Image: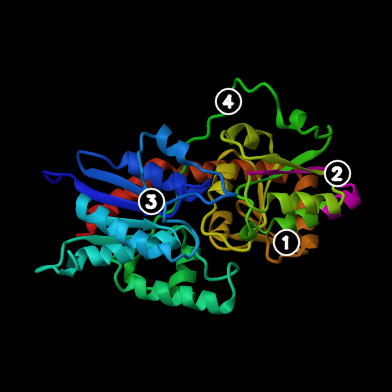
Amino acid sequence: MPDSPKRIVRIIARLNVGGPARHVVWLTSKLHEPEFESTLIAGTVPPGEEDMSYFAVENGVEPIYLAELSRELSPKDLISVIKIFRELRRLRPDIVHTHTAKAGAVGRTAAFLYKYLTFGTLVGRPRKVRKIHTFHGHVFHSYYGKFKTRIFILIERLLALTTDRIIVISDQQLDEINGKFKIGRREQFVVIPLGIEPIANDAGQTASLREELSIPDGKLVAGFVGRLTEIKNLDLLLETAALCDKDGSPVHFVIVGDGHLRNSLEQNAVELNLSNLSFAGNRKDIAPILSELDIFVLTSKNEGTPLSMIEAMAAGVPVISTAVGGVVDLAGRIERHEDGFEIAERAVLVSTFDPADLQKGLLYLLKNEKVRETLGLRTAQFVDERYSVTRLVSDVAQLYRDVE
C-alpha cells in the first residue's frame, strides 16, 4: 500500500434518480483513506428530473457541484471543461474517473488538458494522471437521429484514444460498444458489473400500495420503477395495459417514478381509458414497493444494466422485459421459446416492441404461479452472488491499483 493515498476525482453529469447516481456515491464513500482519497464532481439536475443529491448526503459525500455541467449539449460545456480543469489542478488527481456520456466527454477533455497544459502552455513533462470512463449505458441507438448518433460515436472513438481503461457493466454492452460500434481497443475494456446494497423492507410501513391505489383484490400487481423518459418506452406499457384491460386480464399496472414525460403519459392513460393502471410518483424508499409487486415490467428501447431490474431480482420479483442491452445478460440463457416471447433462466424476454407480445408474456406469468416462484428464487440468489456493492468496490479498487 502506498505511503500517501491515491487521489481519485470522479465526475458525473448529474445526480438524478437512477443507478449511475447511486453507483458514483457508493464508490466515492467507500473508496477512502488510507488507500484512496475520493472527490466527486457533479453537474445540475434539469427541471423535470428528480434530484438525488440527498443520497450523497446520506452517505457522507459532499460533491463539488458545477452549475454549467448538465445532460444536454450546450455552449456552457466549454465552461464546464475549464472549471473541471481548474479543479484538477487544485486536487492533483492520480486518476480521473468519468461516468455517463456527457461527463465522459467534458471530464476526459479536461483531464487531457490537465495532463499536458499549465497556465495555457505545455508542461515540461506530462502529468502522471490516468483516465478511466464507465459506460452505464450508451446513446448509440434509440436516443437520437442517425446524424447526431454518428457524431456521438465519432466523439467516443476519439475520446477512447485518450482513455487508459474503459469500464462496461455487462458482456452484452462490451459486444455493442467495442464490437458493433468499434469504440476503443479490446484491451482497454474491463467488465465490472453493477452492485447494490441489500434492500431492507420497512417493517413500520402502515399503508400498502394496494390500499393506497385502490387496487382490487384478486388482481396481481405488475410494476415499472424508474425515470419517465423516452428511452424507457412507457407507451408500450400503456398499450399493453389497454390490451389487458380490454381482455379483463387479472392484473393492475403501477408506474413508480417521475420525469418530464409524466404529464403526457397520464394524459395518454386517460385517452386510453385505462382502469387498470396507476401512477405512484417518485418514492425514496423502494423496498416497500418491490415487496408488493408480483411482476416487474421493463419496456426499454436501450439499457446498460438496469439497476431497477437488479433490485427487483434481489427482492425475488419475477421480471418480464424487452430483450435489450444488459437485460439479456441478467436474464441468462434461453430455456424455451414461446409465441411472442422467450423464457430465460431468470426472466421472461420479449424480442419485439409489440404490445401483443408483451401481453402474451405477461399472461404466461399471471397464469403460472410456480414459474413466478421459480424465477423469484433464482434471481434473488443470482443477485446475492454477483451484484453486491462490496464486490463492486473491490473490483474498482483493484482496477485503480492496476492502472499505473
> Does dot 2 land on a helix, a strand or a loop?
loop
Q: Bin the neighbour count of mark 4 within 10 Å (Cα to Cα): few under 14, some 14-19, many 20 and up.
A: few
Q: Which residues are magenta?
A: 242-257
Real-space Cα distance between discs 4 and 1? 35 Å
> Does dot 1 land on a helix, a strand or a loop?
strand
Residue 202: image tag: 4
- Above or below residue 322? Residue 276 is above
Determine contact: label 3, label 4, CB under 8 Å.
no
The mark nearer the N terminus, 4 or 1, is 4
- The nearer-to-camera label among 2 and 1 is 2
- Above or below residue 261? Residue 313 is above
Residue 275: image tag: 2
Residue displayed at 74% across by 30% down: 212
Question: The disc labelled 2 sits on which kind of residue?
Answer: Ser
Viewport quadrant of the N terminus: top left
Viewport quadrant of the C terminus: bottom left
Question: The disc labelled 1 sits on which kind of residue?
Answer: Phe
Q: Nearer the viewer, residue 232 or 258?
A: 258
- The nearer-to-camera label among 3 and 4 is 3
Q: Bin the neighbour count of mark 2 within 10 Å (Cα to Cα): few under 14, some 14-19, many 20 and up.
A: some
